[in-house]
Image (cartoon, grey):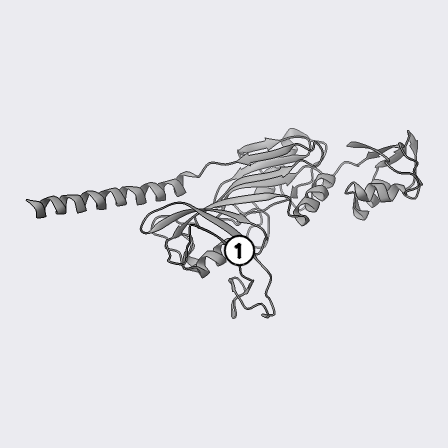
Amino acid sequence: MRFDFIAKEDGILLKTLLKQQGISKKLLAKIKFDGGDLRVNGVQATAVFRLAKQDQVTVVIPREAATPTLTPQDYPLKIVYEDAHFLVLDKPAGIASVTGQNYPDQTMSNFVAGYLKAQEYENQKVHVVTRLDKDTSGLMLFAKHGYAHSRMDQLLQKKALTKKYYAVVHRSDQLLAQAEIRLPIGRKDGSIIERAVVAADHPTAKSAHTSYEVIQSNDQLALVDIQLHTGRTHQIRVHFAHLGASLLGDDLYGGRRDTIKRQALHCHFLSFVHPFSNQKLVLTSALPEDMQRILDLGANQKSEQAALEKDRATQIVV
């Protein structure tokens, strides 16, 4: 894959320009040793070549082979967006994002590996940019080559990628119409899985910032639109459990499972400025059927309760 740049100042080293363009030392080593190419004005150059203003720099990034330990598997992916650099999928609930001890295969990474192989793309390595918990549904971003992954990591570090989630939560007096939650999160004492809101001086404490707005609600439930500003493990689940507004289905943090068997959480919005085209991408995903059914059920129950109260009032008047 080829990329072209123009030097905008005199005297800088080629490797400095490449760093400015998001090419890491690791990627530069791959270019040097794994079949890539660096050229200045059409002539091969080393990373310490000193550039002149308006020099034309060409970078050829070598092909990336598939990861041998990641088994490609077929699955009907729901593609929301795709170009030469990125792939955005709508992940169903119940599928893990990446392989691990508990999920050796049948993950989104396996399915993307299968897709890349079937399409016979130049780069076969799977690059996960944003991941979701197994039981969280919604938008998931993959890079289609290492340079794209590096550029997205830069955006993530600058907090220039916006992710929003829908959650159906239990109503709570502490749940406001909209608010910012800035409470540190750490490991829950005595557990290797659970997280909790902890004191700032707790040995595992990490700062965590969540914004939210209630979209609709009834006496028991609320649909909340959430934006993450940090990416701590179980951040949304922990912050809302702390407010007494646990996600429905999230029994790890106090949510009921009578109407849904997974945490009612869906990544519905993803936006960033494309690092290669400079165009702003805004990608969305509709609320999944199981979460919509909870809201419909709550609305029906509210309507039935209102009708019952009206009937009782009519009987009293008569």
Mark yes or no: residue 33 visible: no
- Whether residue 189 is situated above or below residue 44 in the rendered picture: below
- Whether residue 59 is situated above or below residue 221 in the rendered picture: above
Which residue matches tag 1?
Answer: 235
Viewer-closest of 259 and 305:
305
- Give the residue drawn at x 90%, y 43%: 13
Q: Could you say whether the residue bearing mark 1 is in a helix, strand or loop? A: helix
Q: Position of residue 59 (x, y in %)?
A: 83, 35
Is residue 157 left or right of 288 when viewed as pictured? right
Disc 1 residue type?
Gln
Viewer-closest of 170 and 309:
309
Q: Residues within 10 Å of mark 1 (few under 14, many from 20)?
A: many
- Whether residue 151 is situated above or below residue 205 in the rendered picture: above
Viewer-closest of 20 and 88:
20
Mark yes or no: residue 124 visible: yes
Is residue 121 left or right of 10 when viewed as pictured? left
